Amino acid sequence: MKKIAFAGALAAASVAGGTAGAATLDDVRAADSLKCGVNTGLVGFAAPDANGVWGGFDVAVCRAVAAAVLGDATKVEFVPTTGQTRFTALASGEVDVLSRNTTWTFSRDVDLKFTFTGVNYYDGQGFMVRKDLGVSSATELDGATVCIQTGTTTELNLADYFRANNMSYEPVPIETNAEGQQQYLAGACDAYTTDVSGLAATRATFEDADAHMLLPEIVSKEPLGPLVRHGDDQWADIVRWTLNALIAAEEYGVTSANLEQMAAGTNNPEINRLLGTEGDLGAMLGLDKDWAKRAIAAGGNYGEIFAATIGEGTPIGLARGLNAQWTQGGLLYAPPFR
Amino acid sequence: MSAISDETEQSFRLSMLLYDTRYRSLTIQVIASIVIMLSLSWLVWNTIQNLQSLGKDFNFGFLTQRAGYDINQRLVEYSSESTHGRAALVGILNTILVAVLGCALATVLGVIAGVLRLSKNWIVARLMGVYVEAFRNVPLLLWILLIFAIMSESMPQPRDFREGGDASMLFGSIAITNRGIYIPTLEWGAGSNILVAVFIASIGGIWAFRRYARKRQEATGEILPVLWVSLGLLILPSALFYFILGRPVSVLYPELGGFNFSGGVHLRNSLIALWLALSLYTGAFIAEIVRGGILAISKGQTEAAFALGLRPGRTMRLVILPQALRVIIPPLISQYLNLTKNSSLAIAVGYMDVRSTLGGITINQTGRELEGMLLLGGFYLVLSLVISGAMNVYNSSVKLKER
C-alpha cells in the first residue's frame, strides 16, 4: 500500500513537472487557438462589437499573431483582463500573449519575469476633466478627486506627480475603465487619469464629448506593447517579429490592397524576405514562409490598423504623433528583415 | 490484559493489519497520514518547481520596499513613500474598521428585525418578513453595487453646494454628496483632557449606580429609575464641566473649499456602501437567528412572566432574550465571521481594505502573488480565530451554568 501511494505521487509529480517546460508555440498549435489577454473593454483598443466579435488596435496584434502561427486570424480566444488580473493571467499560462495597453517598465520586464516584444503604441499619462470645472492645467488640480485604475503604472505616476508638485489629491480607486468612466461622468471624481490614448478612447464614447477636455500635461512615458512570459524565446520572437512585420510593411508600402501583388515578387529584397518570396525567415521562427504575409493580410499593415481603429478618421481621433514611422518623424522603427 | 497482549504478540501476522479490526483502524490512519504528507510535500515541491521555472524566488522582502501608491482612507499615517508592509497595515485596519462597524450595525438591525417579525402587528411583521427575504435571497455583491450606485449617481456633486447650486447641507452641517458624506467633527482644545476624564468618571458612576440598584432590588424588591439616573449621570457632569472649562471642545463643520469639502469627517461612498450592504445583508440572517432563538423558548415562560405582572417589553428583555441568547450566539458567531470575510468584496467599490492593498495593488506591483496571498489568507485566518475566540468567551459566560 505504501509503495503504491508513493509511486502514485511520484507519477503525478512527474506529469506535472513535464508540462512546465513545454513550448508555447506547441501549446498554441495543439489547441489550434491563441489565447490572448486583452482589456475588458476600451473602445478602439479592445472591445467586442454588437455581435460579440472583438476588434481594436490591441486586438489586431492578437489576430496578426494568430494568422502568422495558425493561418487563421479568427482562431483567437480573447480573455478580458483587468489591470490587476493581467499579470497573473499571463504568468499562470491562462493566456499565451498579453496585448493590453501594458506599459513596458523595468520591474515588469526584469522582476515580474515578462518579455516585452516591442511597442505598438507610444503613450503618456494625461488627465481628463470637464470643461466647466475651470481647470486648464494639471498643476491646478491641488485637492482634486482623481479616478484611477488600480494596479497600473498610472497609479504610481499619479502619486509621484502630485508629490513632486506638492499637491494633494484624493484617489478613487476603480477596477476597470468602464467603472472609471461611470464614476467620472457621475461627478464622483473631478479628473480621470490614464494613458492619453485611453482617455481619448473613453471620451469618444461620451454623449457630450465636447464638454470634456484633456489637460495639456503629459506626466509620464508609457510605451505600450504586447508581452509574453520569460523563458520561451522562440515564442517571444514570433510575437516580436509579427509586430515588426506590421510596422515594416507600412514603411515599405505593403498594404492589404497590394499584398498579393507584392508577394509575387518585387525588386526590393527586404520586401521579398518579409513576404517569404526570398530567403527562409519563417523557418527560422519555426513557421512557414508566408507567416508575415498572413499577419499583414489579417488587418493590414500598422498604419492601416491605426487608421481603422484609433486614427483621426475614427471617433477616437488620435493623431499619429510619436507613433508615426521613423521616416515621418515618429518613433516607429522596425529592425531590418534580413 | 497482559494475557491478551501476549497471545496477540505470538500470533501476529501481517495480514491482521488488514483483516483484524483491532489493527485495521491503525493501518488506515498510518496510510492516510502518509498519503496526506506525500500530497502536501508534492504540492510544496511542485510550487517550488513552478516558481523556479518562472525564475521567481520566494521571499517577503517586498514588504519593506516603497509602495508608491496612495490610499484614500487611512487610519494610520501613510503616504506613497511608505512601504508595502505599511500599506498592508492600512488595509488591515480598514478591513477591521468595516468589520467592526458592520457587526455592530448588523446586530442591532438583526435583533430589531427578528423581534419585530414576531410582532402581533400584521404590517410590522410582514414588513420585516419582506426585509429579511429580500436581503437573504439576493447576492451581497448586488446590494453593495446598488447602494454604491445610488450614492454616486443620485446624490449631488460637491459643486452643487456652491452659491447658486441646488443642493444644501443637512441641518447646515452634514453634506451628502456623491463622493460620500461629510459630517462635522470635534476639535479638542485646551482642557479637553479634563472633560474626557469627567466623562469617563461619569460612566464609572453609572456602572456603580447600576450595581447598587441591582443589589437594592435583590434585597428589597424596590426598582430604582435606573435609566433616568444613568442618562443624568452621563450628560449633566460633562455638560457642567464643558461650561466651567470654557467650552474646550468645538465642532468643526465641513466647508466647501477648492474641489471638495474640507474639515469634518469624510465617510467615503465606498465605506458607506460596503458598511450598509454588509450590515443589511448579515442583519437579515441575524434576524432569522434571533427569531429562531426566541421561538425556541417555551411559550410558558412568557405566560409565567405575564402572570407575575411583567409587561411585554420587560418580559422580552429580562426573561426571553437571556434564554434565547444561548441559542442565538453560536450561529451569530458564524454570521460575524461571514461578514468579516465578505468585507473582501470591497474591491467592487474601491474600498481600500487589505484585499485591495496587500492582495491587490501590492501583488500587482511586485508580482509576489504567492507570498501576498499567503499573508492575506493568514490574516483572515487570524482575524476569524480572534473573533470566534472572543465570541466563544462571551458564549460561555451566558450559557446555562450547570452546577
Image (cartoon, coloured by chain):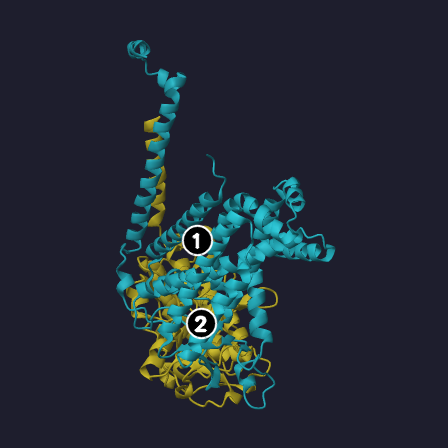
Chain colours: A yellow, B cyan
> Could you tell me residue B49's position as x and y percent?
30, 48
How many numbered callouts? 2
Q: Quadrant of the C terminus of chain A?
A: bottom left
Q: Which residue is mark 2?
A: B238
Q: Are marks 1 and 2 in contact (CB under 8 Å)?
A: no
Q: Amino acid at mark 2?
A: Ser
How packed mark 2 is, by other alpha carbons closer than 10 Å (few <14, some 14-19, many 20 or more), is many
Q: Quadrant of the N terminus of chain A?
A: top left
Q: Which mark is residue A315?
A: none
For mark 2, name the chain: B
Determine if residue A53 is in view.
Answer: no
Q: Amino acid at mark 1?
A: Arg
Instruction: Tell if the residue under mark 1 belongs to the same chain as the one under mark 2.
Output: no
Of tags 1 and 2, the one toward the viewer is 2
- Asked if residue B155 is positioned above or below residue B116 in the image, the reply reads below
Query: From the viewer's perspective, is A33 left or right of B54?
Result: right
Q: Which mark is residue A29?
A: 1
For mark 1, name the chain: A
Query: From the viewer's perspective, is A296 left or right of B170?
Result: left
Kind of element beneath mark 2: helix
Q: Nearer the viewer, residue B173 or A322?
A: B173
Determine if residue B213 is in view.
Answer: yes
Kind of element beneath mark 1: helix
Q: CA distance from mark 1 to mark 2?
A: 79 Å
